[in-house]
Image: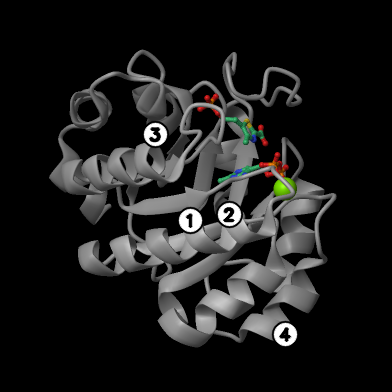
């Protein structure tokens, strides 16, 4: 554990790859069963009913696996879920989203709230001051999900050790790149495409996990 967070694979859903409730839940169940340690619900649609339905189903699924569900962008949705699932629900915020300090105030001190920091230690310092639970940096490699995300050098992961918060690497993390991001300092490796575009989710997760071996040493670092 690192700052109360597990270390390892952080899977992020994609509503284009998983366009309906059934595909979303089936894929997430397989990912969780295969060893994902954190799951983010990332849905950019404006369909509030669908978002509530899917997020509640995912929260129940995560509860079964003892994993925290992180909601992307949507503080109000995280707050509603928190009423039922408490600390099993967190929030991820980018630079264009709700201010982190406000989310911290609303969700309380125990909630996991992550912050996008791109390649910036200044943004990381601001997020840490505002109460972030983890700092996300990227994108480190070419990303199929968000090719337009600004690139970041791997060195920022090592430099961010000074904040004493778990570091997340995102952007183009796949079997060929995951060990490089881990070795550069990331405690959590965030993945969309290399998990959820796979026809065999469990095999995809295992292929990523294998690259993190010796996993026991990594998790105990
Ligand atoms: C773990 C993690 N890191 C970064 C992001 C990106 O957040 P943001 O910059 O707000 O962009 P969107 O995901 O909202 O498009 C993330 N979601 N998760
Ligand atoms: C949602 C997101 N944010 C990024 C950032 O750099 O902030 S990269 C990204 C997409 C990550 O997907 P994939 O694993 O398919 O590259
Ligand atoms: Mg966002």
Evaluate if marks 2 and 1 touch, with contact meaning CB atoms under 8 Å apart: yes
- Asked whether, in this view, residue 3 is left or right of residue 201, the answer is right
Sort mark 3 into few (<14), some (14-19) or many (20+) by Cα contacts within 10 Å. many
Residue holding disc 2: 50
Q: Look at the numbered disc 3 and give the secondary structure of its residue.
A: helix
Q: CA distance from mark 4 to mark 2?
A: 27 Å
Q: Position of residue 115 (x, y in %)?
A: 67, 55
- Asked whether, in this view, residue 6 is left or right of residue 93, the answer is left
Sort mark 2 into few (<14), some (14-19) or many (20+) by Cα contacts within 10 Å. some
Classify 113 as above or below 108: above
Q: Earlier in the sequence, mark 4 or mark 2?
A: 2
Q: Earlier in the sequence, mark 1 or mark 3?
A: 1
Residue holding disc 1: 54
Q: Which mark is residue 182?
A: 3
**Residue closest to the eye, 77 or 39:** 77
Q: Position of residue 10 (x, y in %)?
A: 41, 45
């Amino acid at each position: 554990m690192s700052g109360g967070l597990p270390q390892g694979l952080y899977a992020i859903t994609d509503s284009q790859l998983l366009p309906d409730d059934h595909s979303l839940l089936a894929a997430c169940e397989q990912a969780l069963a295969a060893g994902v340690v954190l799951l983010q619900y990332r849905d950019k649609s404006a369909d509030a009913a669908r978002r509530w339905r899917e997020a509640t189903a995912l929260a129940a699924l995560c509860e079964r696996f003892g994993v925290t569900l992180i909601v992307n962008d949507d503080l109000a949705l995280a707050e509603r879920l928190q009423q039922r699932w408490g600390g099993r629900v967190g929030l991820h915020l980018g630079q264009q989203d709700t201010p982190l300090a406000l989310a911290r105030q609303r969700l309380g001190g125990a909630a996991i709230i992550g912050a996008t920091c791109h390649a910036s230690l200044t943004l990381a310092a601001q997020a840490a001051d505002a109460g972030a639970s983890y700092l996300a940096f990227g994108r480190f490699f070419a990303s199929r999900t968000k090719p337009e995300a600004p690139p970041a050098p791997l060195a920022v992961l090592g430099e961010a050790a000074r904040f004493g918060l778990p570091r997340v690497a995102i952007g183009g993390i796949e079997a060929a790149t995951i060990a490089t991001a881990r070795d550069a300092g990331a405690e959590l490796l965030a993945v969309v495409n290399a998990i959820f575009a796979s026809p065999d989710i469990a095999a995809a997760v295992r292929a990523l996990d294998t690259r993190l071996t010796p996993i026991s040493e990594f998790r105990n670092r």
